[in-house]
Amino acid sequence: YLDGDWTAAIDWYRRSIDASRRAGSDLDAALGEANVIELLVAQRRWLEARPLLDQVRRTLVSLDAAVYLPFVDLQLGRLHLGSGDLEGATDVLTAVRDAATADGDPFGALEASIPLTLATAEKDPAAALALLETAVATAGDLGDYLAPAIALARASIRCALGETSTAKEIADTLGITERPVRRIIAELEAAGYLQKQRVGRVNQYQVQHDLP
């Protein structure tokens, strides 16, 4: 998973799911399937992810395991976002964020706020940016784990506002050096989140908004 070999990750998750079922643990099997859903959504395999998502949600409800539903609903929100259903994404992700906030979970609120800003940036980019920065500030150091996703969301909002920034300007905004910014840009380009275009002597990058 961490190495980006999602095919192998799904295979190992499914082995774990089978073992859980053999052991009679429906909950562990459902949680394994939730991890598979996350990877399917990340690969934009919507048609495979949606029925599994509905199944896992029903299982968790039947097992009185609602504590795990926010993670599943987060994937549903990302699925809506990636497939272009911005209204559906906004509704689901707002509910996930609000629930995390009520539970005193700033990391969960930030995790939901990042795709939520992408869902709302086109309609009201200024409000989306304010939402994102509030979530980042509230999460504090917990947000470091999500730094690349936060940077992508900020870039998307800047595009919606009609703004452009250099790597140095992004670094100054984030309070880091230019070198890690360039590394993050390279990683986002390799993952398909940014598309590079040569303009004169400089590279310009366009955010691919249809990705989760």
Image: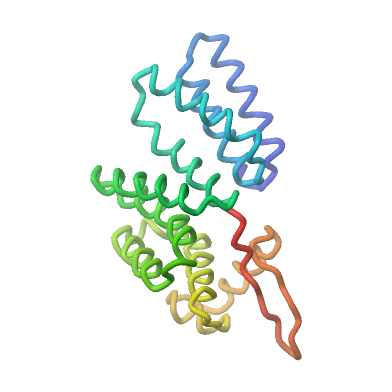
Left or right, 118 with reference to 12? left
Q: In the rendered view, would you say 196 is above or below 17?
A: below
Which of these two is toward me, 212 or 122?
122
Q: Position of residue 17 (x, y in %)?
A: 58, 21
Q: Residue at x 39, y 17 (%)?
A: 62
Relative image position of residue 14 (x, y in whole percent): 63, 25
Looking at the image, is 85 positioned above or below residue 190?
A: above
Q: Position of residue 126 (x, y in %)?
A: 39, 73
**Residue closer to the observer: 94 or 22:** 94
Residue visible at 23% across and 45% down? 102
What colour scheme was applied to this rendering of the protein?
Answer: rainbow
Kindly identify the residue that appears in the image at 59 percent across and 67 percent down: 184
Give the image quarter of residue 8: top right
Of all residues, the one furthest to the bottom in this rendering is: 200
Where's the N terminus, which quadrant?
top right
What is the count of numbered marks? 0
Answer with left or right where residue 99 lies relative to residue 172. left
Q: Is residue 124 above or below residue 97?
A: below
Q: Position of residue 79 (x, y in %)?
A: 55, 44
78 with respect to 136 (left or right): right
Residue at point 37%, 55% (across, down): 142
